[in-house]
Image (spheres, grey):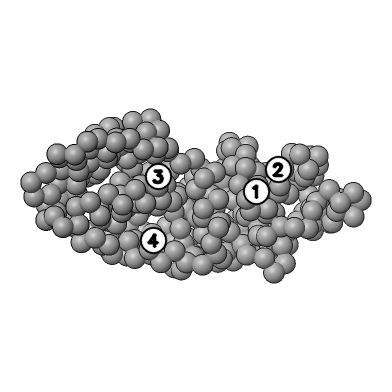
Amino acid sequence: MIVDLPDTTVSKVSKKLSKLRQEGGVVALGRVLTLVIQTDFRRIEEVVEAANASSRTHPARVIVVADEVDVPGEARLDAQIRVGGDAGASEVVILRAYGGLAQSLNGLVGGLLLPDAPIVVWWPNSCPDAPAESDLGQIATRRITDSANQADPQEYLKQLAKNYQPGDGDMAWTRLTLWRSQLASLFDRVSDKKIEMVEIIGSELSPSADLLAAWFRVKLGVPTNISRKHKGRNVLGIGGVKIHYEGGELKMMRSAQVAKIKQTGMPSASILLPRRSVVDCLVEEMRFMGPDETYAEILRGGFR
């Protein structure tokens, strides 16, 4: 069910949600959190699709705020409520804020938050330099940015490190979960070797490559080098890792969804290593409401 509420107020939206619940039980009460998403008008459907898919694991009230400060005319709020089959396991409220209303996002969503439930804020596109100090970030338990979508991802990582607060998280780090798991296992193979350098092969603007290099430096205490083999933002992400040690090399190179592992003097092997989708990363970020201590350590130790 989709209900449009043009030129409305937050109070009217809240009352309509309550009415839908009373009339047919369309809006279930088993939500475990509120997911607030700040995006632009062009990407509303894209982020709603991701939120709906993640709601199968984390049922939530999803509030999408699409703001446009520079639209001429008076301040106005258009809203849309999606429930039932149009909202997955969530209930979705889309707020299109124009003019002056777009400058006070905290006030817009405040009346729609679930009581006594954690608040997760996700910026899939343009992200604040200091998430915890932003309008929406101030009310959030968890704050999710995506450095890969910023104009200068490497510089943005430095800003995140400078302004880090417990509860901050970034999709570029979450995309590394499978890589870190496999690489930790591989490192056991050469734990008795003298590591000379770890080389990371990644795209030119991939912040995940920078975070992985920082992980090696901070957690494992080994020198690193990033080989930017592909131009562009997300052409490749991370293509492989080579561990150079005295007398040999151990490498894991990904092609499509499979990674090949080769070590000097040893037979090669293949493992499944798929690229993580936005939904995969969003589900993982919402799994824990506490601070990600490892991410904080890598961010502070690798980019300050």
Q: Residues within 10 Å of mark 4 (few under 14, many from 20)?
A: some
Alpha carbon of mark 1 to alpha carbon of mark 4: how far? Answer: 24 Å
The residue where tag 3 is placed is 148
Residue at x 40%, y 47% (from the top left corner)? 178
Alpha carbon of mark 3 to alpha carbon of mark 4: how far? Answer: 16 Å
Q: Earlier in the sequence, mark 3 or mark 4?
A: 3
- Residue 294 position, x and y percent, is 38, 63
Q: Disc 2 on helix, strand or loop?
A: loop
Mark in the foreground, 3 or 1: 1
- Left or right of 193 in this view: 185: right
Query: Which quadrant of the view contains residue 242?
Result: top left
Q: Are marks 2 and 4 in contact (CB under 8 Å)?
A: no
Alpha carbon of mark 1 to alpha carbon of mark 2: how far? Answer: 7 Å
Task: Residue 97: tell me if it is visible.
Answer: no
Does 259 appear above or below 152? above
The residue where tag 2 is placed is 88
The residue where tag 1 is placed is 55
- Left or right of 104 in this view: 158: left
- Residue 75 position, x and y percent, is 69, 50
Does 87 appear above or below 109? above
Q: Earlier in the sequence, mark 3 or mark 1?
A: 1
The residue where tag 4 is placed is 295
Mark in the foreground, 2 or 3: 2
Q: Earlier in the sequence, mark 1 or mark 4?
A: 1
Q: Disc 1 on helix, strand or loop?
A: loop
Q: Amino acid at mark 2?
A: Gly
Q: Earlier in the sequence, mark 2 or mark 4?
A: 2
Task: Residue 84: tell me if it is visible.
Answer: yes
Q: Disc 4 on helix, strand or loop?
A: helix
Q: Are marks 1 and 2 in contact (CB under 8 Å)?
A: yes
